[in-house]
Structure formats: structure tokens, C-alpha cells
Image: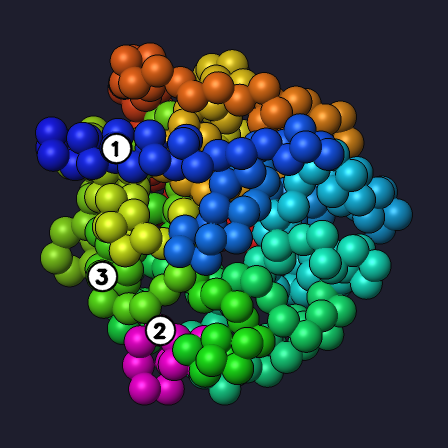
């Protein structure tokens, strides 16, 4: 990462930390979500595969209600999580608690009409007439971006839904390709973005021809896509904090969470497949103190050297479902 980009990220992180407040009722730190100015909990409840690991519906609903009771206000789901099962479960909680939650969902279809049919059903499953963030799910490569941006692509529909207040904000997520996410952010009018941000510096380097190779240990979402999103004053959501569990035994969990939350992000999404994990992660969030810059550099350098390449290869064909 160049000195100028590093200095910019450090300044942005200082500004983010300065804008962090603590909810008096729950003790949960809160941050503004980019230019929306809406404050959300710095910890989000991830409703992907970890939420679906609650096999019984009553256990899943109890877990989500417990998270909200402890002060989590950001709930992250998607149509692709169990082909609507996650949204259905979340909707049963939203039926009585919608006004407590910043609700985000995602659409994995690229054609406008097909996407719209799923979005209409998503709203029914979520038992709401609007979502706070509607993301294009899992951007892959430049060809995928072209399909999203095409005249009959999903992005045009998302702009319309934002104008109609069906989606208060629109965004885009990406798991492995910082270059194409940077391109998407630069070329389009998104409010938010969700990217893999962890101590192992996830992110492969793209080369012409649609291939991805790990040529540079410093190439990451943190170095490439994050600065662009911040310059556009977007809300940034960190994900894959634990590297899809591949980092959980490589570093203390609290340090992994602290690292991601010390970046200039609004919120970090974490899946919590057991009820006890909810309290554990909430306690980490409530005890959050920014990691010193020197410690962040040492921490990420150690993790990246040992684990970045393996994580990059894993996320290159990872299906977020």
C-alpha cells in the first residue's frame, strides 16, 4: 500500500472513531453509515450460512431476538441464503421489531426483470415494505460488472427502487476481487459497499483476461477498494472478519474483531451459529478500543504472510449462500 493511501486510511479511521458514540440503553458502540448519517451498531448479525445452521426455526428466531435485545441494530440477510429461508426467518422477527433494525438484503440475479420478481418476494418474506440497504450480491469479475450495468441489468432497477424508497440505500458486495469492486464503485452511484476486510488482508489481484492471481501480498480490499469507497463517503460494511472460520484458530477472536472494527468502517458483519457466540461477540464490540496503528500493521503482517494466499484461493470460487 502506498504511503498516501495508508495516510488517507489512517485519517479516515480517526474520523470514524471520533464519530463513534455509545448507545446509553445497551452500551453498544454506534457509527454513522456513510453519507446516510444513520447510526448503526458496529456489530451486525449475519444471517447467512451461520444463521441457517440453527436447524430449528424457533432456535433461529430466539438467536436473532437475543442479538437485538443485546443492542445489535444491523441485520444482514440475502435471498441467496437458503433460497429465501434466511429472509423468511428474519421476517418473522421483523413482524414485531422492524423499527428497531437497519435491515439489509441482497439480490444475486443480474437481469432486471428476474431480480425484480425476487425482490418483490423478498419484501413479502421480510414482512416489510422497504429495506434499508439492497445490495447487488457477490460481484465476481469485470464481465459480471458489465452484466450488472447493462441496460437490462439489475443496477438500473436498483436506482428505480431507491427513487421509490423501496430501498433506502443501494450497495454492492464482493468477496475476492478488489479491483473490480473499485471499478464498480468508481463508475456507479452506490450508497454502501460490503467487502472482505480482515487481518489477513484478503483480496486477489486481477489481470487482463478475467483471471485472478495473487501477485502481491499487499494487494487487498483494504488497500484497493476501501479508499475509493471512503472518498465517495459511502457506508462500508466489513465481512469475512474470521475468514469464513479459517482464521479462528490463527489469532484471538477478539483481536480479529478489533482489527476489522479499527478500520474506517461503519459495521462488521459476523455470523453467530451458537447462542453463546452472540453474547461473546457483543461483549467484544461493547469493549471495543481502537487497535494502535503499529499493532494493526504487525498483526496484519503476521496473518497475511501465513494465511493470505490460502484465503485468497478459497474466496476465489466461494459461494456466499
Q: Residue at x 65, y 64 (%)?
A: 83
Pair 3/1: label in front? 1
Foreground pick, 98 / 52 = 98
Instruction: Tell me which segment is drawn in magenta.
Output: 148-158
Q: Which sits earlier in the primary sequence, circle 3 or circle 1?
A: 1
Q: Residue at x 20, y 36 (%)?
A: 8
Residue under numbered circle 3: 186
Foreground pick, 168 / 212 = 168
In the image, residue 189 lies at what x, y percent? 32, 68
In the image, residue 194 lies at what x, y percent? 43, 50
Q: Is residue 29 magenta?
A: no
Q: CA distance from mark 3 to mark 2?
A: 14 Å
Classify residue 95 by image quadrant: bottom right
Please determine whether, in this image, residue 299 is positioned above or below residue 51.
above
In the image, residue 88 lies at what x, y percent? 75, 62
Residue 11 has which mark? 1
Tell me the element at label 1. Answer: helix
Residue 190 visible? The answer is yes
Q: Residue at x 72, y 66 (%)?
A: 126
Residue under numbered circle 2: 148
Please determine whether, in this image, residue 152 is positioned above or below residue 293.
below
- What type of secondary structure mainly makes up the magenta span? helix
Tell me the element at label 2. Answer: helix
Q: Residue at x 53, y 82 (%)?
A: 164
Amino acid at each position: 500500500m502506498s504511503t498516501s493511501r495508508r495516510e488517507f486510511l489512517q485519517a479516515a479511521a480517526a474520523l470514524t472513531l471520533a464519530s463513534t458514540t455509545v448507545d446509553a440503553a445497551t452500551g453498544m458502540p454506534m457509527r454513522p453509515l456513510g453519507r446516510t448519517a444513520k447510526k448503526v451498531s458496529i456489530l451486525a448479525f449475519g444471517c447467512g450460512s451461520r444463521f441457517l445452521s440453527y436447524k430449528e426455526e424457533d432456535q433461529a428466531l430466539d438467536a436473532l431476538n437475543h442479538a437485538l435485545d443485546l443492542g445489535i441494530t444491523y441485520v444482514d440477510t440475502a435471498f441467496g441464503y437458503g433460497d429465501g429461508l434466511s429472509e423468511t426467518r428474519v421476517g418473522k422477527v421483523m413482524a414485531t421489531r422492524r423499527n428497531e433494525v437497519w435491515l439489509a438484503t441482497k439480490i444475486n440475479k443480474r437481469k432486471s426483470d428476474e431480480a425484480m420478481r425476487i425482490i418483490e418476494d423478498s419484501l413479502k418474506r421480510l414482512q416489510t415494505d422497504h429495506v434499508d440497504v439492497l445490495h447487488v450480491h457477490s460481484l465476481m469479475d469485470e464481465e459480471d460488472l458489465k452484466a450488472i450495468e447493462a441496460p437490462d441489468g439489475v443496477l438500473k432497477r436498483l436506482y428505480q427502487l431507491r427513487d421509490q424508497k423501496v430501498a433506502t440505500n443501494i450497495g454492492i458486495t464482493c468477496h475476492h476481487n478488489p479491483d473490480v469492486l473499485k471499478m464498480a464503485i468508481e463508475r456507479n452511484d452506490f450508497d454502501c459497499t460490503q467487502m472482505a476486510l480482515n487481518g489477513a488482508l484478503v483480496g486477489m489481484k486481477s489481470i487482463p483476461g478475467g483471471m485472478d492471481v495473487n501477485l502481491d501480498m499487499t494487494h487487498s480490499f483494504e488497500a484497493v477498494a476501501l479508499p475509493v469507497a471512503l472518498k465517495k463517503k459511502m457506508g462500508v460494511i466489513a465481512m469475512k472478519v474470521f475468514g469464513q472460520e479459517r482464521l479462528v484458530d490463527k489469532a484471538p477472536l477478539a483481536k480479529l474483531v478489533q482489527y476489522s472494527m479499527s478500520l474506517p468502517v461503519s459495521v462488521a458483519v459476523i455470523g453467530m451459529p451458537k447462542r453463546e457466540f452472540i453474547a461473546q461477540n457483543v461483549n467484544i464490540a461493547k469493549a471495543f478500543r481502537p487497535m494502535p496503528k503499529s499493532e494493526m500493521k504487525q498483526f496484519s503482517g503476521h496473518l497475511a504472510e501465513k494465511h493470505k494466499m490460502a484465503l485468497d484461493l478459497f474466496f476465489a470460487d466461494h459461494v456466499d449462500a
